[in-house]
Structure formats: structure tokens, C-alpha cells
Amino acid sequence: AAQAGAGWALEVLYRDLAPAVTGYLSLQGAPEPDDLASETFIRVFKGLAAFRGDEAGLRGWVFTIARRRLVDDWQRGRRPFPVEDRADALREHSGGGVGGDEALAVCARLPDDQRDVLLLRILADLNIEQVAAVMGKTAPAVKALQRHALAALRSDTRDASDVAASL
């Protein structure tokens, strides 16, 4: 129905994916994540008739467009906000749950590509192959980035536990 241009279907598509897209863009440091999300969905809606695939494929395609919009924004000279300055975005897109500041601090310590993999896997709910397609990497490269990111998270958790135990 969305491919045929049915307004209600486009609205459902937007309502289902826009929060995750905006959250992804926010956590990647986009200075204007709402604007980039809007631009993403304009491109999605314009290209939707030509899209072929299932729901998972659609999700991957939407995040590919969002990531490309983000990279385009950076290439135009709009540098991302430092990860440390993104606490409000994380709270807004994570439902304000406990642990958001800790998650943000962990994100701040990860290299960009590792953070990108985790955000696409968790926030965008993409599988390894979809993340590889979005990032223009191979599935084994994405698995390695994920493995390194998770190892860093485990190390941070152990370090935090050691500090807490010493207090």
C-alpha cells in the first residue's frame, strides 16, 4: 500500500521507523537529526515504488539512506557533535530509561565504526548482513567490529565493577 502511495501506509511506515532513524542520526552526532530524518523519508517515499524486498530489507534500505544523508551532511562541512554532548538525544530516543548516561559514556569511548555497528544492530534492529550493506563493508568485517565493540563494553563493565568495589 505504501508503494502505491496510500497515505495511511506512508504514515505507518514513517511512524514505525522515524524514531529509530532520528535516534540513530542523533547518536551519530547529526547537528540537525530531525531535518536529516525528514530528508531521509523524502528520499524513501520518492524511491519506494522501485523498492523490492521484504520488511527487513526495507528497514536496511531506509537506514542506508539515513547513513548516506549523514555522510553527505558531514562532507558539506557540518561536523558531528562530540559523543559526550549527545546525552539529551540518547534520553529522548531511549525513552529516558536508567542507564542512558552510562550507555552514552560507553558509546563515547568506542571508535566510530564500532559505535556505528552497535547502533545499527541494536537501535535499527538490523542483522549482520544488513549492517554490512548499510556500511559498505563485508559481513566478516562487521562481525569483527561488533566483537571488538562488545569486548570493549565487557571491559568497561569490569572496570566499573572494580571501581565500585573499591569504594
Image (cartoon, rainbow, N blue to C red):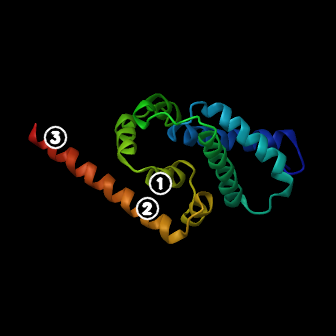
- At label 2, the amino acid type is Leu
Q: Quadrant of residue 25?
A: top right
Foreground of the two, 44 or 16 = 44
- At label 3, the amino acid type is Ala
Q: Quadrant of residue 150?
A: bottom left
Name the element at disc 2.
Answer: helix
The numbered dot on residue 164 is 3
Residue highlighted by disc 2: 145
* Image spot of residue 3 (x, y percent): 85, 51
Residue at figure coordinates x 32%, y 59% from the top left? 151
Is disc 3 in contact with disc 1, using a CB cutoff of under 8 Å?
no
The numbered dot on residue 113 is 1
Tell me if residue 114 comes above or below residue 31 in the rendering. Answer: below
User: What is the residue that sits farthest to the bottom in this orientation?
Assistant: 140
- At label 1, the amino acid type is Asp
Residue at figure coordinates x 51%, y 30% from the top left? 92
- The mark nearer the N terminus, 2 or 3, is 2
